Image: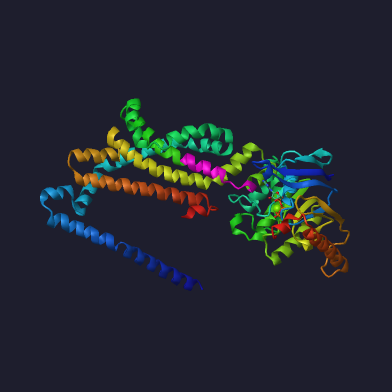
Amino acid sequence: MSRLVVSDVCKAYTGKNTTDSVVALQNVTFTVAHNEFCSILGHSGCGKTTLLNMIAGFERLTSGKLLLDETPVGKPGWERAVIFQDYALFPWMTVYENIAFGLEMKKVPLKERTYVTEQHVQLVGLAGFEKRYPHELSGGMRQRVAIARALAVDPHVLLMDEPFAALDAQNRAMMQNEMIRIWETERKTVIFVTHSIEEAIKLSDRIIVMTCRPGHVKENIVVDLPRPRHEEDPAVTTLKRRIRSLINKELEDESCTAKKNGL
Amino acid sequence: MEQVVDKAQSKTLKVSVLSQLRNLTLLSILLIAWQLISTKLLSESMALLMPPPTALATAAWELIKSGELLHHLLSSLKRELWAFLLAAGAIPLGIAMGWWKIVHNQMDPLIEILRPIPPLAWIPLSILWFGIGDSQNVFIIFLGIFFPILLNTITGVKNVETNLIRAARCVGANEWNVLRRVVFKAAFPQIVTGIRVGLGVGWMALVAAELVGASSGLGFLINDARTMLRTDIVIVGMLTIGVAGLLIDVIIRKLSRRLLPWSVGLSK
Ligand SMILES: Nc1ncnc2c1ncn2[C@@H]1O[C@H](COP(=O)(O)OP(=O)(O)OP(=O)(O)O)[C@@H](O)[C@H]1O
Ligand SMILES: [Mg+2]
């Protein structure tokens, strides 16, 4: 079981002076069920990355609780693998070595390591590219390596921060379909940060819509539609319209800093 | 298809050889002028101070034949190598300084004081400490190599992308593995740059150290030749120092490109 509970989480970044401090998140509360695909949607600067970094263990919470299977999350570890927007592949390692890296760190015996690595090379469709270096790959392929590297250690939760934002529209659509296929093969609890309403609806079981900064949960929407979801499907368009109006309303809100900054 | 490629390749090869040759035009003219001036225009005593290229070639050939040049070159290279091996200690120190703030804060004042002192300024003190000989020479060269490696390593470590470190941690790497497998590797191109700069500085310091405190080496060779007014040997020695320095740099660049195929920044 891997259930993630986010309970009353606040995060303030303190600057040099007290006036410099930024409250990024305020009383964020939601729960992600075991093997659920949960998207986090919100305007730029509302604290999505901050939340993900805290779940990963890269940053500390100011207050509140983050529980993974009833235990508070601590230092970064393989139970919470992260996929970054800029891929963060090790440029001095081949595709194969990148994917095997986590298994090596976990001290998985060589035989099993080889098996699991090869399996994940297959899973993300990179057979034949094992010996290539990251700089020899396209953006989409690099992101596949990053996905395989994270999945290979068999994490309890997969954290993804706008993983497809750097890809062009075509590659992006393809990677979304790939993501669904991969996730259906290897079920995981996923937290998926995105800017795109379409992407969130296409992929998620649950969508957390955030307010502007300081971010908290504006709406917790369960998407109970069969996959694959088509854009023309009336249920999808209705949901899209609903979320868009939520987000637009958020922009009209007086206190929205994003609007004040002209974003 | 292949033929077209072949033709294109042989054409570009021809063109590149031609343009390389063209780049040597000025040098050739100067050499010829030098030859003419020192054989035809200068008086004999003046020509002694400025021997013509042909005389240099003869002197070089004599030195090579007797094995003297190789002997001095090797003893200089040996000192440079020893100093480099000792100065490689700057790599772990630099990693520690780039990684742990406390190490940086403690070491930094010390290094900031020592670093601006040119290696040559250490020569008098080092002669008193070590006497004249290999250890004194190695010490001076060591100072030349050490700081470039140290500073570049620190910069390299500080500039490692945060996400690479995070990516390693979140698939289970511990501190030691993060340092060894990620930070060191990511900083490596910068460390190699430090080694290149360091060996260059060291090579210059080497010759200076040998001028005053050695009984072998290229620096000794040219200084010794000076006392006997053998300007031809002096100049041959100088050219050998230049060529050897260039070769060291070329070798390291070639090696690093071979060893770091992923590193684009090193190609220049
Ligand atoms: N290390 C930090 N120090 C100070 N303030 C920070 C830091 N990181 C983020 N912030 C602030 O916290 C707020 C939330 O940032 P965060 O990066 O989490 O937003 P985001 O929702 O991920 O935005 P985007 O969609 O643009 O990626 C921003 O106002 C940002 O300026
Ligand atoms: Mg972000």
Magenta stretch bounds: B149-163
Image location (x, y in percent) of residue A1 = 85, 44
**What secondary structure characterizes most of the magenta part?**
helix
Image location (x, y in percent) of residue B81 = 40, 38
Does residue A79 appear anywhere in the picture?
no
Residue at x 45% of width, y 36% of height: B87
Q: Nearer the viewer, residue A260 or A43?
A: A260
Q: Nearer the viewer, residue B240 or A34?
A: A34
The quadrant of the rendering that contains the C terminus of chain A is: bottom right
Tell me if B64 is positioned left or right of B136 in this view: left
Tell me if B136 is positioned left or right of B172 in this view: left
Residue at x 47% of width, y 41% of height: B149
Q: Nearer the viewer, residue B227 or A205?
A: A205
Image location (x, y in percent) of residue B143 = 40, 36
Image location (x, y in percent) of residue B28 = 26, 60
Does B158 appear in magenta? yes
Q: Is residue A172 above or below residue A146?
A: below
Q: Is residue A33 above or below residue A75?
A: below
